[in-house]
Image: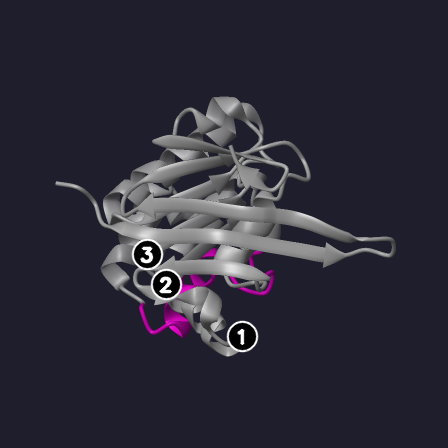
């Protein structure tokens, strides 16, 4: 059975104005991602990887082109509507863990799911068990190691059972062994939920562990 296409990016373009010139970052990007598929987005620094991820997440608006998420044209939505899609249907994981310092691990894990009205206690318990966080629920982020914080960030992103998990260099602050462990857990949980998984990484080794790799060069998929 062929999986449904979850994400479609068509002819996406984005430029930024510098003090000296108009800098074209994306120059007509096309990309598709199926439900349950994991894709690594690679490319040299400045090739537009993070920009593409931010546009898909609705954190910025493209100059031209289309982004479709499960039949919804995200690129055509207002700022508030894109924020609602990001809250309710997307899981975001970044190199900086972005946990809420004043909340304990258990509340950090549940935060997005609760504000999205998608909290599922049984799924929360499964995430806690799979991520090895049961003994850490009463701790605050500052009391955790980098690997533990990234596990919490992944759990928070997956707690809403998103359509799409977007990760921007999620293992960049971790040592190799911890990075392998965290990414393995992310892949397993993505497979468990059937969501799509798009990860920006500079590591060819980690990229090779995903279903497919796409390379971004000079603002285009090559």
Under tag 3, what secondary structure? loop
Secondary structure beneath dot 1 equals helix
Mark 3 vs mark 2, CA separation in Å: 5 Å
Q: Residue at x 40, y 50 (%)?
A: 165
Whether pointer 1 and pointer 2 mark residues with C-beta atoms closer than 8 Å, the reply is no
Q: Which mark is residue 37?
A: none
Instruction: Say what secondary structure mark 2 lies in.
Output: helix
Percent x, y of residue 97: 57, 50
The magenta-colored residue range is 98-118
Question: In this figure, which residue is indicated by the disc labeled 3?
Answer: 163
Is 193 in front, or is 111? 193
Q: Are marks 3 and 2 in contact (CB under 8 Å)?
A: yes
Residue at 50% x, 76% y: name it: 78
Residue sitting nearer the eye, 62 or 132: 62
Locate residue 49, reporting x and y percent.
Answer: 58, 43
Q: Nearer the viewer, residue 126 or 42?
A: 42
Residue 113: in magenta span? yes
> Quick one: label 3 or label 2, which is nearer the N terminus?
2
Where is residue 108 shown, x and y percent of the image? 47, 60
Mark with earlier residue (1, 3): 1
Q: Nearer the viewer, residue 105 or 33?
A: 33
Residue at the extreme top: 205
The residue wearing badge 2 is 89
Q: Nearer the viewer, mark 1 or mark 3?
A: 1
Residue 19 seen by the camera: yes
Q: Which mark is residue 79?
A: 1
Whole-angstrom CA distance, mark 1 to mark 3, is 19 Å
Relative to residue 118, is residue 146 depicted above or below?
A: above
């Amino acid at each position: 059975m062929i999986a449904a296409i979850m994400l479609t990016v068509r002819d996406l373009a984005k430029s930024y104005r510098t003090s000296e010139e108009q800098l074209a970052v994306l120059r007509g990007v096309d990309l598709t991602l199926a439900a349950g598929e994991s894709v690594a987005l690679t490319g040299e620094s400045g090739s537009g990887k993070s920009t593409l991820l931010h546009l898909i997440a609705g954190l910025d608006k493209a100059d031209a082109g289309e982004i479709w998420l499960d039949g919804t044209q995200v690129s055509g939505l207002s700022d508030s509507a894109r924020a609602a899609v990001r809250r309710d249907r997307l899981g975001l994981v970044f190199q900086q863990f972005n946990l809420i310092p004043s909340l304990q691990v258990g509340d950090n894990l549940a935060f997005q799911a609760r504000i999205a009205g998608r909290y599922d206690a049984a799924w929360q318990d499964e995430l806690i068990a799979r991520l090895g966080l049961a003994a850490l629920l009463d701790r605050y982020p500052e009391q955790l190691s980098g690997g533990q914080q990234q596990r919490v960030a992944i759990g928070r992103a997956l707690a809403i059972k998103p359509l799409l998990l977007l990760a921007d260099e999620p293992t960049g602050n971790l040592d190799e062994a911890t990075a392998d462990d965290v990414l393995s857990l992310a892949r397993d949980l993505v497979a468990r939920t059937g969501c799509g998984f798009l990860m920006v990484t500079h590591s060819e080794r980690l990229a090779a562990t995903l279903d497919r790799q796409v390379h971004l060069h000079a603002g285009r998929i090559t």
